[in-house]
Amino acid sequence: MICDEVQTKLEAYVDSELTGREQTEFEAHLQGCGSCATDALGLMKMKHITRAAAVSRYAPSPEFRRQMERSIRVDKRAAWTGAWLPRMLMAAAAVVLLVASVTFWEKHNDRERAFAELTDMHVTTLASANPVDVISTDRHTVKPWFAGRIPFSFNLPELQNSEFTLAGGRVAYFHHSPGAQLLFNLRKHELSVFIFQEQEEELPLAAGEVTSTKLAFHMESWSEGGLRYFVVGDAPAADVHALGELMKKAARS
Amino acid sequence: MADTNSDSGSFEELATPLIGRLYNFAHWLTQDASEAEDLVQETFMKGLKGFASFRQGTNFRAWMYKILRNTFLTTRSGLRAATVSLDDEVAGVAEPVASGTPESILMAGVDYERIQSALEGLSVPFREVILLCDVEEMSYQEIAETLAIPVGTVMSRLSRARRAMRELLGDRVKGASR
């Protein structure tokens, strides 16, 4: 290196910006050149004294520093909230979903148990030597028979233009509540229609229409006029539904 | 010096050690305590707000100084400073140091007050580049990032700023010796 080149790199040298090789060459020149070495030393001292004079010239007041630190801590909380809030919400959503699932499962289970109970009742009735207490195909005979035996009244459908025939009826108990069980025949199938008073507290079957199929038995259930209806039988689902529709029509007439 | 500074961590972890340094830099730029506080406060606010956009692993210090400096340029004193002409700025050319001057100044017994007074006498573009290089000990690359100028311009501006400072010191030394 010659002096001119060294002079243009003096500042880069004192600012530690030279590459390893450049620095070696630079320092080699300084060792043999008193003039350049003096300039380099002068610049270094200048840099050093500037830093010393300016680095702590102004200091923030303790209050201001605390204020800044507090503002950063606020951010930390915000960041925590920012980072954890979605996770917490997700966790909360998961809990809600779990509770809903359990509730649904329990309700579903309750409903299944109710259907099973009514299906059992239907099968037991069919197996009985005297399946019905009032044997009549005439709705005008069956309906009055229930008067005084159950705490409500209901309408029976007109079956003349349908494939269904009424076999009779009996009093049934479901969840300690008396109701009507009506037996219908459809071809070689037998179907029961259960009618109970709506007791949401006790019956696990909330308002609304539900259908269920289990072991070749089909069931349909709905609420109307404060009464809960169940149609159960081994007939095809469409027939169970058709009987349900007849019952609904009668209830509205 | 290679730019090897890379940072990662929370804003609090990275910014807390910079409070004093940023304030000092802000005060040097504004030459006013209350303006410096406002500037630092706004810098932190912007830093907090934009921290998500800060690329973890890159230079946090340069990022914060850049915010502070850009914020300063929007203030009244910053706008005044921005009007200072920097013509004849030739990128990449460091000017030869005037032989003997720094040494003779130091030999003449320059104290901190004279250095401080000379720094204050510099235009803001010169003052800030000296502060970033000599006081904050940033590499040319970091200074280039902070000031959003090429490294070559950093070198030439630094060279001119130092010469201006030597001239101011020389005047003061001469003035003091008269």
Image: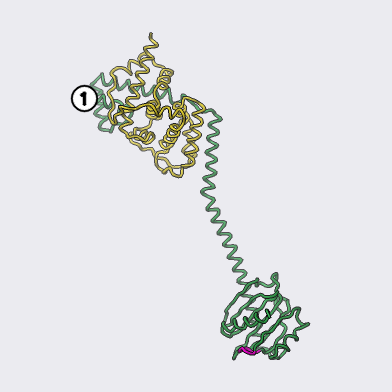
Chain colours: A green, B yellow
Image-based side of B139 in relation to B113, left or right: left
Give the x, y percent position of residue B16: 49, 35
Tell me the quarter of the image containing the C terminus of chain B: top left
Q: Which residues are magenta?
A: A160-165
SS class, disc 1: loop
Residue at x-position 56% and y-position 30%: A63
Residue at x-position 52% and y-position 45%: A79
Judged from this view, the residue extending furthest toward the top is B178
* Chief SS of the magenta region: loop
Give the x, y percent position of residue A19: 28, 33
Judged from this view, the residue extending furthest toward the right is A148
Give the x, y percent position of residue A164: 62, 88
| Residue A161 image-quadrant placement | bottom right
Image-based side of A230 in relation to A3, left or right: right
Give the x, y percent position of residue A183: 66, 86
| Residue B54 image-quadrant placement | top left
Residue A93 to residue A56: above or below: below
- Amino acid type, mark 1: Ile
Q: Which residue does the numbered mark 1 point to in the structure image?
A: A2
Residue at x-position 35% and y-position 24%: B161
Does residue A170 show up magenta in the picture? no
Asked whether B128 or B14 is in front, the reply is B128
Tell me the quarter of the image containing the N terminus of chain B: top left
Pointer 1 chain: A
| Residue B107 image-quadrant placement | top left
Residue A185 to residue B40: above or below: below
